[in-house]
Each structure stands twice: as C-alpha cells, then as structure tokens.
Image: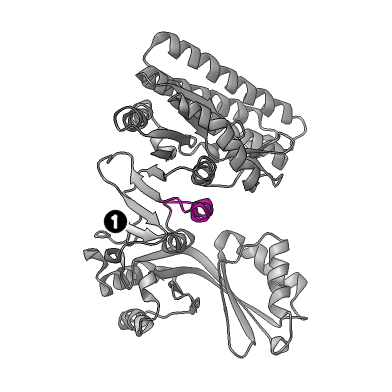
Amino acid sequence: MLVVMKFGGTAVESGERIRHISNIALNYQQKMGFDVILVTSAVKGMTDEILAVAESVKKGDKSAVNQFVDRLKRLHLSLIDSSIFDEAKKKEAKNTVSELVDLIKNVLHGMLPIREVTPKMLDYLLSFGERLSTFIVSVTIEDIGGSSQYLIGNDAGIVTDSNFGDALPLMDTTKLNVSHRLKPLLAKKVIPVITGFIGADQFGNITTIGRGGSDYTATIIAAGSRADEVWLWSDVDGLMTADPKIVSDARVIREASFAEALEMALFGAKYMHPRALEPAIESNIPMRIRNFMKIDDDGTLVVSNPGKNSHKIVKAISSIRHTALIDVSGVGMVGAPGTAGRIFDTLAKNKVNIMMISQSPSESSISMVVKKEVLQKATSTLELSLLGRVIKKIDVKEDVAVIAVVGSGMRGIKGVAARVFGAVGNKNINVIMIAQGSSELNLAFVVNDMDCVEVVRTIHGEFDLNNS
C-alpha cells in the first residue's frame, strides 16, 4: 500500500513533534509494510513572517530584515538540536540550514537597495520556509534509522505555469515526472520527503501554488505516484459537524463524499485546501484527515461514494465570518443581456473574488458576498467602472457571515429549507440572503455576523448532529 502523508505547520513547530511525525512515517513503512511519501509544510507562521519581511524590504528596513534572518536561523537550529541526536548528522544539518539562511539573507539584502519584491522573487523567498523544515524532517528520519531523500517540489517533478503566487500544475507533465522520479526511491525503501507548496515553471523558476498549497502538493504527488490513499495529518481530529470553537459538542464525521468535503472546505472548514481535492477526485484516491497526536484515531475518510451508514440529511454546518455584502441595483439592469457578466468581469479584472451570488427574479438587483478586506476595492471598482451606467445604486452591509448547511442527504428531501429557516426564525434572527445550487448539496445563507454563533448552534441542534 502506498500512502502520501502530508504534515502541516503545527507538526513541525518543535523538534519533539518532528521526531514524532518521523516515527509515524517509519512505523507505517517498517512495521506495517507501507510505501510512504511525506509532504511537509513550513513551520506554523513562517509563511506570514516571510511575507512580512518582504514588506520590510519594500520599505528599505534593513534592521527588520536582519532581525528576521537571525530569528529564522535560531529557530531552525533549535529544531535541529531537539530533533536530531547523532552529532555528525546534527553538525551536517546545521551546516546546510546555515547555508540556506545565508542564501535568503543575501537575496533579501540584494533587494533592499531597489526596494522591490517582484512576484517571482517573492515565490523564491517563500520557498525557504518549506525547504528548511522539510530538510530537517528528512535528516530526522535518517537519525531514527530510516532512509529518506529530501526533495524540493520541483525536484519531485511538479511543473507549473508561470503564474507566480498562485501557480497551477501542468498535471500531465507532472504525473509523468513524479512517477519517474519517486518510484525508484520507493523500490529501495527510501522515504521521499517533499516540500509542500513549491513547484517550478518550465524555465526552472521556483513557483508557489497558493496558501494551503501543501495539501495540494500531497494530492498532486498522490496522483502522479498512483497512491492508494492520501493522509492529511494536522492538529484536528478530522472533518467536524461544526467548528468545535462554536459548537462544543461537535462530532467528527467518520466518512464523507468528495463533494461534501469540497463544500465544507469552500465554506470555511480549515481542514483542507479546496483545490487539493481536485487531483484526488480525478484519480479517485481516498483521503484521510487525521490528528498526528492521535495516531490510533482514523479521522475522516473522504471517498467518492460513502457507505450507507454515513448518509444523513445534513452532515455539517460551516460558516465564513466577517465578510461583507454588496448589493447593486438599477432598473436598467432588467432584461439587459450581459449585465451580470460586466459586473463580474469588472471585479475579476481587479482581482476581487466573489464568494456567493444571488439575483432577484426581477433582474433589478444582484447581491454578492466578498471578504471584508477587499470590500473597499470592490466598491470603488464598481463605482468607477459601472455606477451611473450599468448600475444605479450600490448598497453595502459590513460584518455579515455566510452559513452553509452541507449534506448529500438533502437531495430530493422535502422540508429541509423549512426546518433550517424555521429554526433560525424561532431565534428571531433575520436571514439577509439565500443561495442554493440545483445539486441540493448545500444551502447557503447570510446573516449578521453577531448572529453567526447562535445560528450555527441552532441548526446543529435542529438536525441532532451532536449524535452523529
């Protein structure tokens, strides 16, 4: 059995945890007889730190750059001290880490005089978070007694386009590369330890595949290596019926479909990156979401066709908080072909992502939900480009929350919406906007953000999800 295991940032934030996850990988390889491929994230918070130091470069702040470099070196040398015990391996690892830190230091200092960080250079900088942590994991496996090979994502075969910051893999080429490069290592019982998040374009330039890209890397590698399963190890027990921070008695969902998992990921569940599901779906590779601190717990299994025991009318309640609602209206929109297209195209060209859409049957208004941080850009874009021509009025409602009721069991079942909105209405909470796809896989609606917690708890109780 070939399993691709991805470990997130919390799994590598201490030497003890690095040694723990290395033992997990070796246990499955040596005791269970599995072939194992590891994909590793940067230390938790490291990507944000690199983004912050990039801003310091733009300001010409040499002091902030030096402080970051010192902190980066101390952190990773400390991880080596507590994860690698053999003195010779420890010395070699420290030398390599020091060389990597010196490299990023030279790059940062080289950019300081011009105070510019291009997308291409930013991707190169961001790659160091994963390169440092993954190298330490690889040496730790060797230290414990296994055999491993450290690989940057592009060395493992991931080829992408040149859209720096959010690159897309060229899947046909990548699959061939991954199979060709990893199978000989697996045949020798070597554990490939691969950086998440990183690829390279066809010219060899380092690219990154977006935030949360380590999950995506894992499923890309799984598709290329024809893995039997992908395991996403993190500090959560699996997909949950609701955010446990909101609903204290939320339960782990033991089995879910790809479609259900995708809806949960899109609507705020932070257990996997939505894009990560695409290679798994296309190659029909089951995924497990597991807690690396609870290795005896199987977590959540995500498959194309779950067993009958997992079929429930509603499976989970997800929420996205602190969003904003934009309503554009005008009599001129009625019956005018291409109005919606012009609105969405204008926002897309200014890199404003729309999370949810609803249009009145009269065609006189369109409501859109966006992240609060892009609200100002969205409204100014619409005002400058379309107000007074295509649209006559823009109304904004800040601090709303999107609630998504997810479950494949809702298909064809009468009265689900009535139960949802009846329960919400009984709490005297106003629903601002509603959207449901024809698949009936999810029912999404918008409420004031201050009502989010009560709404999630109410619907969770209405469908008795605490007894899942």
**Residue drawn at (25%, 41%) of the image:** 296
**Residue drawn at (31%, 30%) of the image:** 27
Q: Is residue 169 visible?
A: no
* 241 is higher (above) or lower (below) than 44: below
Q: Write down the region rendered in magenta.
A: 270-286
389 or 20: nearer the viewer = 20
Measuring from the top left, give residue 236's x and y in whole percent.
34, 48
Q: Is residue 210 visible?
A: yes
* 255 is higher (above) or lower (below) than 337: above
Which residue is the site of mark 1? Answer: 252
148 or 336: nearer the viewer = 148
Q: Is residue 398 left or right of residue 349?
A: left
Measuring from the top left, give residue 259's x and y in whole percent.
45, 63
Measuring from the top left, give residue 300's x and y in whole percent.
33, 53
Amino acid at the residue labelled 1: Val
* 267 is higher (above) or lower (below) than 186: below
